[in-house]
Amino acid sequence: LSRYKVAMVGSGAWACAAVRMIAQNTSQDDPEDEFDDDVRMWVHQGGELVDTINSTHENPAYFPGIPLGPNVIATGNLAEAVADADLLVFCAPHQYIRGICKQLMGKVKPGAAAISLTKGMRVTPEGPELISQIVRRTLGVDCSVLMGGNIAEDVGREQLSEAVIGYYNLEHAQRFKKLFQRPYFRVTLLPDPVGAELCGTLKNIVALGVGMVDGLGMGPNSKAAIIRQGLLEMRDFCQALYPSVRDDTFLECCGVGDLVATCIGGRNRRVAEAWTRSAVEGAEAGEGNGAGRSWAELEKELLQGQKLQGVLTSNEVQQILRTRGWESKYPLFTTINRIVNGHLPPHLVVDYLEGAKADI
Ligand code: 13P
């Protein structure tokens, strides 16, 4: 009997939480026993970290104190991680996916199915390209997405979390559901893969806005206003680019669910709060907009090797808005982008209609 072999491409906090659920499911004795027990995980740093994961079954660099499972086998060799895999799970920061896929061209098993857990997009002169589209185009495999309000550490602690699998191929999606679903991790299927993936991507921009509101010392009313406007712009942007995106998707856990989780407890919010405090202090010291600590510095200090997605995504989305002449239709996205890049002071986040009109 041949069983589906699984590979995890990534080893950050979310990849660790996800591989832990997968490993729990693949090692379970169920009558169908569809999956091979062992799950390979690619660790880009290789070397010592690989040895540590394989001997302690934990990833101290990104997911300390939470066991991954004895059947997770780490490797520093990407091609080796995916060799023979029938199910490929992509969960690396979005800026690295294209490079990873290029290295994997011709190395993936024909007929394999992929799923992306990565939130982000790429912008080319021809237009936007979603992470799942990069996987599909470069590797020639079907690619679903798994999206939701899933702060990695909370999933690792087995706290109730929800996710959707956005899919094109129902059979693959059902198989992936079996791979991820746990009593504490509720998975539903959603036939709107583009809407689900774009929600997961765009909410990172809104989270920056909420972090700015926190950094300015404002309370829940102002944050709610930013979240509401953010959700509206998320919907309008998705449907302007892809008219097939459904309204209902925004009420799912990949829409409002992920938005709320990230705006309460995500890294984008946290780093944006610190950045805003520092920017305000810099401005008060007479150093002008853009003074204070840099995003890169704060990412390094606060995220300890994890990557901030929102600033890159804001710049990527803004490129699309600028090219299409849509900036005034998305005043919150536009104002956040101008603040992030030091062109406007942070307090304009709550005055986004003015911010989007500003002559910069
Ligand atoms: P952050 O990257 O802001 O931590 O968001 C996490 C997330 O996507 C939760 O679903």
Image: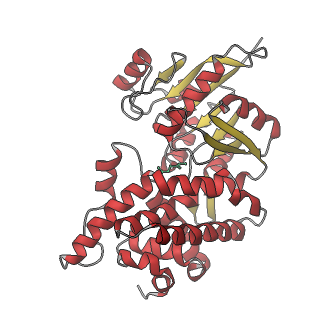
Residue furthest toward the left? Answer: 285
Q: Is residue 322 left or right of residue 239?
A: left
Q: Residue at x 24, y 76 (%)?
A: 283
How is the protein colored in the picture? secondary structure
Q: Where does residue 213 sit, x and y in percent of width and height?
A: 41, 68
Q: Given the current orientation, which residue lies at the most extreme top position?
A: 1
Apparent side of residue 97 relative to residue 289 in the rendered image (left or right): right
Q: Residue at x 39, y 27 (%)?
A: 65
| Residue drawn 35% across the image and 46% down it | 303
Q: Position of residue 288 (x, y in %)?
A: 25, 79
Q: The N terminus appears in which quarter of the rendering?
A: top right
344 is higher (above) or lower (below) than 274: below
Q: Is residue 95 left or right of residue 115?
A: left
Residue at position x 55%, y 23% in the image: 40
- Position of 147 with respect to 274 (left or right) is right
In the rendered view, would you say 149 is above or below 275? above
- Up/down of 160 relative to 41, above or below: below
**Quarter of the figure with residue 345:** bottom left
User: Residue 211: x percent and y percent?
Assistant: 41, 62
Residue 174 at x, y = what percent? 78, 34
Of 176 and 42, the residue lying toward us: 176
How many marks do you count on the picture? 0
Q: Quadrant of residue 279?
A: bottom left
194 vs 154: above or below: below
Is residue 208 among what the camera can see? yes
State the residue lying farthest toward the right: 170
Asked whether the viewer can see residue 245, the reply is no
Location of the C terminus (image quadrant): bottom left
